[in-house]
Image: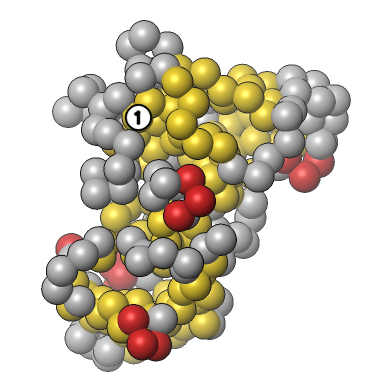
Amino acid sequence: DAGVTQSPTHLIKTRGQHVTLRCSPISGHKSVSWYQQVLGQGPQFIFQYYEKEERGRGNFPDRFSARQFPNYSSELNVNALLLGDSALYLCASSQGLALTYEQYFGPGTRLTVT
Amino acid sequence: AQSVTQLGSHVSVSEGALVLLRCNYSSSVPPYLFWYVQYPNQGLQLLLKYTTGATLVKGINGFEAEFKKSETSFHLTKPSAHMSDAAEYFCAVSAGDTGRRALTFGSGTRLQVQP
């Protein structure tokens, strides 16, 4: 079975631009979470979606938004990019909401803002 | 709020030596605790987790960790290091304020294994 896939792998954007990152969960998984990993730090929780509804949000500005589609794939959108948004963005999928379900992480999208 | 402190951003051991990676947590509710490994240019892979029950948890690749409530610790150990263990290791705790749905990660420990 395919694991969590993310696209694109890398991208470079300019300050002030908008970016959309995409995530496809493992087949049968209904929950998708997004994390931001700045170089040299641990991942930070951004959002969790389950059954197309937002179920959790981390301490990120409103420039960050996400959605989940009927096929459970997800998009993370970031508006008005700042240099500090440069990071590895990780998507994780799981069967359900509770952390007793293992979260499977994708390889990430490396975003560079110049 | 939850937090995790990983002592030592870099740990170097010889092949065959004991691996000990330290993690201390803070949680206002009974924690769920996790260790993840990240290889270069890859996502995170779950090594092991503690939710309830037995405090000594065994994971993949010969790793284990012990939940010690009195010390608020969840240190990761492996009796004998292998070259393939070289990677970044992250300790994480569930975030109680979001209903155990999100993970709060430490800053990571990079493990080097010397031949």
Residue A12, visible in the rendered structure: yes
Q: Is residue B81 shown left or right of residue B92?
A: left
Please provide percent x and percent y for residue A52: 42, 17
Number of numbered labels in the structure image: 1
Quadrant for the C terminus of chain B in the image:
bottom left
Tell which of A58 and A29 is nearer to you.
A58
Residue A13, visible in the rendered structure: no
* Type of amino acid at the residue the image marks with label 1: Ser
For mark 1, name the chain.
Answer: A
Residue at x 72%, y 40% (from the top left corner): A85
Please provide percent x and percent y for residue B13: 38, 87
> Can you name the residue that lies furthest to the front here?
B29
User: Regarding mark 1 in the picture, which secondary structure is present there?
Assistant: strand
Residue B41 vertical position relative to residue B92 in the rendered view, above or below: above
Residue at x 56%, y 37% (from the top left corner): A57
Quadrant for the N terminus of chain B in the image:
bottom right
Tell which of B12 and B62 is nearer to you.
B62
What residue is shown with label 1?
Answer: A31
Residue at x 17%, y 28% (from the top left corner): A1
Please provide percent x and percent y for residue A39: 63, 55
> Can you name the residue that lies furthest to the top here?
A70
Quadrant housing residue A104: top left
Q: Within 10 angstroms of label 1, few (less than 14), some, or many (20 or more) residues?
A: many
Q: Is residue B83 shown left or right of residue A53?
A: left
Residue at x 36%, y 9% (from the top left corner): A70
Tell which of B90 and A13 is nearer to you.
B90
Quadrant housing residue B18: bottom left
Q: How is the image coloured?
A: secondary structure
Please provide percent x and percent y for residue A35: 53, 42
Residue B73 vertical position relative to residue A45 in the rendered view, above or below: below
